[in-house]
Image (spheres, grey):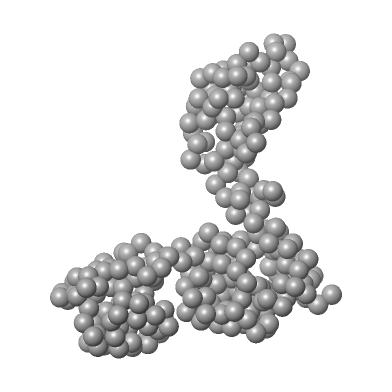
Amino acid sequence: MPRLKIALPNKGRLAEPAIDILNRAGLKLTDLTERRLFAKTVDPEIEILFVRAADIPEYVETGAADLGITGYDLLMETNADVKSLLDLGFGQARLVVAASEASDIQSIKDVKPKTRVATEFPSITKEYFEKKGIRVEIVKVSGAAEVAPHVGVSDLIVDLTSTGTTLKVNRLNIIDQILETSARLIANKESYQTKRSKIEEVITAVKSVIIAAGKYYVMMNVPKEKLDQIRKIMPGMAGPTVMDVQAEKPMVAVHAVVDEKDLSKTINGAKKIGARDILVVRIERIVS
């Protein structure tokens, strides 16, 4: 069977998380070098190629790669004809319009025709301002768009921001948001048909990591007469699992999957009711 090729970002904010999610999904990368171009995985039928995140939509669309991990913003920018499979839940950011704090532009309503906009996303930017009915001059830049308004290159920028801190440091105000983005797993449409079985294996493996994010397996021994009280505070994917324990006094073992946000409350509540021998284990994968 032909190998399944997965394109990953070779650098940038999505690079390491993309490798990490495949490793945690059981598709551990091997033969990684500092100047990496290719890598094998523990699955002999799957190999990795490293390219620029901006080029991954094209690689997948043309079939140079069967699968790829890239940002939703880059999918929108390239308008690639690919199949979107999963939102991977990392690399979250916002694509925003920003102006200098010293600018007279405080909102989109203040933007006048022929305003210059610096961006790495000319297609998205053009479509956005066309929908607003504003004809702007787009200045394509490669990185460091934040400096453009301060050196006279542009009046506005359209750029990605995660926390807004970089924009504030560079004395820029957000005046509108265009879209929210995150990392996506995408597939070549033909490969999705001809290599469907293997691709579904990858989807299942990666999805199991996403589902397990922030979840813990909690086990405890509980006096049998307190079981109803424990059930009320023990959340679970399908309710807690209860098993008899061989003990002098009637005891049951209660097992449940608990979200991280509920973990402290659940443990403290269980202890007050009389639970003991509480064991908490981080869940790596859940296959549903």
Indicate the quadrant containing the N terminus: top left, top right, bottom left or bottom right. bottom right
Residues 14 and 118: in front is 118
Using the rendered view, name the quadrant where residue 32 is placed: bottom right
In the drawing, does residue 180 fall left or right of residue 201?
left
In the drawing, does residue 279 fall left or right of residue 115?
right
Compared with 166, 249 (above or below) is above
Using the rendered view, name the quadrant where residue 187 is placed: bottom right
Q: Residue at x 72, y 78 (%)?
A: 190
Q: Residue furthest top?
A: 249
Residues 170 and 117: in front is 117
Residue 255 percent location from the top left of the image: 66, 31
Residue 91 percent location from the top left of the image: 48, 64
Q: Residue at x 59, y 41 (%)?
A: 216
Can residue 40 be seen at all in this image of the molecule? no
Compared with 222, 45 (above or below) is below
Can residue 288 be seen at all in this image of the molecule? yes
Q: Residue at x 65, y 59 (%)?
A: 206
Residue 152 percent location from the top left of the image: 22, 87
Compared with 223, 182 (above or below) is below
Residue 85 percent location from the top left of the image: 62, 65
In the drawing, does residue 72 fall left or right of residue 221?
left
Residues 137 and 162: in front is 137
Q: Residue at x 74, y 21 (%)?
A: 244
Compared with 135, 100 (above or below) is above
Using the rendered view, name the quadrant where residue 110 is placed: bottom left
In the drawing, does residue 251 fall left or right of residue 232?
right
Q: How many marks?
A: 0
